[in-house]
């Protein structure tokens, strides 16, 4: 049942409030989770919208307080409200690091060169009060929340495990695949994170957008298969062409996709191409840029 503040009780000790920022990339909006009772943890406070800040505070019952604010990753639909919420409540903001944290050597070099574009939706000013890392446990009246570093959609992306549930941010969602846009996104890291989740036994995923994923292992397997299929499409298309750019490949592979979504598809293709380039499956006409032409090796 949804309250006047837009809060939905998902299960004992877990509430969800969806931010009013619907879009083709966010579905109904960003999911903010309140974990625990009495003293709670907020996961992904969302965009800096005063109405959403009010809704989060209104979602607390009489006498409740916020003990910590966890951020899965620093995109503008997930992290900017964290600072405002912290100022109102005194709760520390906890995350892996700022928006440029955790990039691979390749992605850091591409970011420094500014050659592949990217930066869509990044919160450049994000800085947590406390940095948390893979394997860490955040304990309190809410119980124990385990931290998993799950890069791919963004290098500083974390997931949080609690009572058999996993808060997956934008790594795994039920309604859509994730945008992987270099140098913030990294296809190789995304596939490794999905492989890591496939070896777990979480009972449910609570993603950053959309409804809960009730068959998490099936969903991860489907995402891995989807990305492997896209990679196969890219390699097969390059067999018939001497070289192609990411944009040209996206136009040929993503047939039937709305034109407004083709730029995002091209970013995913570029992420695949960079991963294939690192694995020595394709060659790139130097230098590596967003509009570079790639060919089979």
Image (cartoon, rainbow, N blue to C red):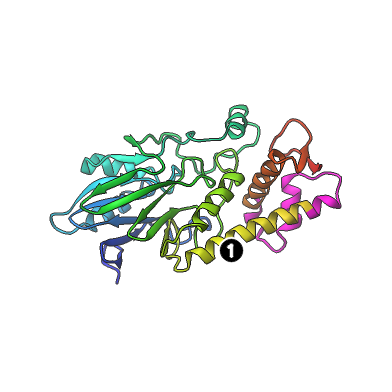
Residue at left 48%, top 53%?
Answer: 170
> Residue 199, percent across and down?
50, 57
Mark 1, residues whose alpha carbon is within 10 Å: few (<14), some, or many (≥20)? few
- Residue 175 visible, this orientation: no
Q: Is residue 51 above or below residue 82?
A: below
> Does the magenta-highlighted stretch encompass residue 39?
no
Residue at left 27%, top 39%?
Answer: 92
Q: Is residue 10 above or below residue 52?
A: below
Point out the image quarter for the C terminus. Answer: top right
Residue at left 75%, top 51%?
Answer: 249
Predominant SS of the magenta segment: helix
Q: Which residues are magenta?
A: 236-263
> Residue 169, percent across and down?
44, 52
- Residue 296 visible, this orientation: yes
Q: Quadrant of residue 106?
A: top right
Given residues 220 and 252, the one toward you in this image is 220
Residue bearing the label numbered 1 = 222
> Does the magenta-highlighted stretch encompass residue 255?
yes
- Residue farthest along the left direction in this orientation: 63
From the viewer's perspective, tell me whether residue 256 is left or right of residue 7. Answer: right
């Amino acid at each position: 049942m949804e309250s006047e503040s837009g809060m939905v009780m998902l299960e004992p000790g877990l509430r969800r409030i969806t931010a009013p920022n619907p879009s083709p990339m966010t579905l109904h909006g960003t999911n903010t989770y309140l974990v625990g009772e009495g003293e709670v943890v907020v996961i992904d406070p969302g965009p800096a919208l005063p109405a959403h800040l009010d809704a989060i505070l209104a979602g607390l019952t009489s006498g409740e307080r916020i003990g910590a604010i966890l951020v899965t990753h620093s995109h503008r639909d997930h992290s900017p409200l964290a600072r405002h919420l912290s100022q109102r409540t005194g709760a520390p903001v906890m995350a892996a690091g700022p928006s440029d944290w955790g990039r691979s050597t390749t992605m850091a070099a591409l970011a420094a060169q500014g050659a592949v574009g990217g930066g869509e939706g990044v919160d450049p000013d994000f800085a947590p009060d406390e940095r948390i890392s893979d394997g860490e446990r955040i304990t309190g009246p809410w119980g124990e929340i385990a931290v998993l570093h799950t890069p791919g959609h963004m290098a500083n992306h974390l997931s949080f495990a609690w009572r058999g549930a996993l808060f997956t941010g934008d790594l795994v969602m039920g309604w859509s695949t994730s945008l992987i846009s270099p140098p913030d996104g990294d296809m190789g890291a995304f596939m490794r994170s999905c492989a890591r989740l496939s070896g777990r036994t979480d009972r449910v995923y609570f993603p950053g957008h959309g409804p809960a994923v009730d068959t998490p292992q099936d969903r991860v397997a489907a995402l891995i298969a989807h990305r492997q299929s896209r990679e196969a499409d890219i390699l097969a298309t390059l067999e018939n062409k001497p070289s192609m750019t990411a944009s040209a490949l996206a136009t040929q592979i993503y047939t039937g996709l709305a034109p407004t979504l083709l730029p995002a598809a091209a970013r995913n293709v570029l992420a695949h191409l960079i991963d294939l380039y690192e694995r020595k499956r394709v060659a790139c006409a130097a230098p590596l840029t967003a509009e570079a032409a790639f060919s089979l090796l």
